[in-house]
Image (cartoon, helix red, strand yellow):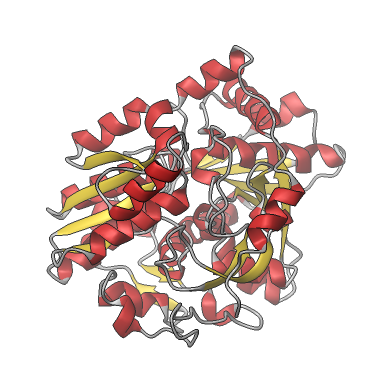
Amino acid sequence: MMKKIILRDDQMPTQWYNVVPDLPNGLLPPLDPETKEPMGPEKLGAVFPMGLLEQEMSQERFIDIPDEVQEILKIWRPSPLVRARNLEKALGTKARIYFKNEGVSPVGSHKLNSAVAQAYYNAREGVKRLSTETGAGQWGSALSFATNKFNLDCKVYMVRVSFDQKPYRKSMMQTYGADIVSSPSEDTHIGRQIREEYPDTAGALGIAISEALEDAASRDDTKYALGSVLNHVILHQSIIGLEAKKQMEIAGDYPDVILGCCGGGSNFAGLAAPYLPDYLEGKKIRFVGVEPASCPSLTMGKLAYDFGDVAQMTPLLNMHTLGHDFIPPGIHAGGLRYHGMAPIVSAMVRENIIDPIRVHQLECFEAGVLFARTEGIIPAPETCHAIRGAIIEATRDKDEPKSILFNFSGHGLIDMASYDKYFSGELHNYDYPAEDIAKSLARLPKI
């Protein structure tokens, strides 16, 4: 009886899949915040290398994965596809539940798929140093690993609440050679400004992004790296779905439902996007994006042009947003605490391809504990959202023999403080007040 499917090294995809040319009605371009006109690569070149900007704007459906990147990816890829038979049994469902285990990477999450590629393209163009932000610490850990592989320096601005909650993420980044500060920090003008105005702030990804961008823009040797949201990040993450398609074929099954947790959108889109051509050809697939009720950009936000950061330094992106100055509460799924959603995911919601749902953190931790006790792997708080979504789908009609595929985006072995708080009753559910979201949305840029 099949438990897991592992592809050979020579079965790992050698090309990424770019979903942009296949999106019905396409994507609206990023806009220059000063002119409100479409933004070309020349201005973005101040913070991103041209190799990544070419991918960001590419209309090619497949893009070769460089040999140097493949060599590093093969340290842990292809990742296993696992049938969660014990979870199925515990739920008493006839649904078949599969998960793509991205927790096997050296840093414990899917983030490394893009970090390696981004470090490679920067090193190829002579960049010496990268600046970035991190929420839960997964992206910061991944970029620290990747910059170490390509002999780059790395500066990480880590959201304050996670910096305090997750000390071992800092240790991991330091092990790989990165320099980490709590955001908002004293190291940037925007950081000092926010600390002065909001001395007790828990921080947010939008603030940390502003700091990392200011850092990159102020130094000639530095470029900026983003761990989610942008097209080139989702391109790199497509390796997840491409492998999963091969593995599901070997299993003799095909997913009726594809799920992932949604913060910026990269892990979910990485699994889901390679299935879009099948969907457009008539395959019946239900795509479900699972987001936290405390930061509900897809279910309560607005599809509009907005900044990706608090200081309004990024291009304007057409995305589902809660407003660039929205500061979410300090829930323990720090990687999902972002005000905006990837334009690719937003476009798939716009076209009614993705069905977004929101869930509370207590039901997610309950789902994560059940998963750990049945399947043996302790999930990251972010991943618990995907597991909760899979359980909702599997138990909606227990007698329906449907096939469910979700992305196990990362393990929780460095997030055990979150579980401590869950077991001691210190975690609470939080619905963000609709009137506060309305106030934040009222401050969107006028386009």
Query: Residue 396 location, x and y as percent?
Result: 85, 41
Residue at position x 80%, y 34% in the image? 93
| Of residues 134 and 34, the one drawn nearer to the viewer in this rendering | 34
State which quarter of the image contains the C terminus. Answer: bottom right
Residue 11, relative to residue 313: is it above or below? above
State which quarter of the image contains the N terminus. Answer: top right
Residue at position x 43%, y 48% in the image? 110
Query: Residue 24 location, x and y as percent?
Result: 66, 80
| Of residues 60 and 5, the one drawn nearer to the viewer in this rendering | 60
Outermost residue toward the top in this view: 424
Left/right of residue 17 with respect to residue 436 in the rendered view: left
| Of residues 303 and 59, the one drawn nearer to the viewer in this rendering | 303
Image quadrant assignment for residue 121: bottom left
Left/right of residue 333 with respect to residue 301 in the rendered view: left
Residue 351, relative to residue 377: is it above or below? below
Residue 198, relative to residue 267: is it above or below? above
Residue 309, relative to residue 408: is it above or below? below
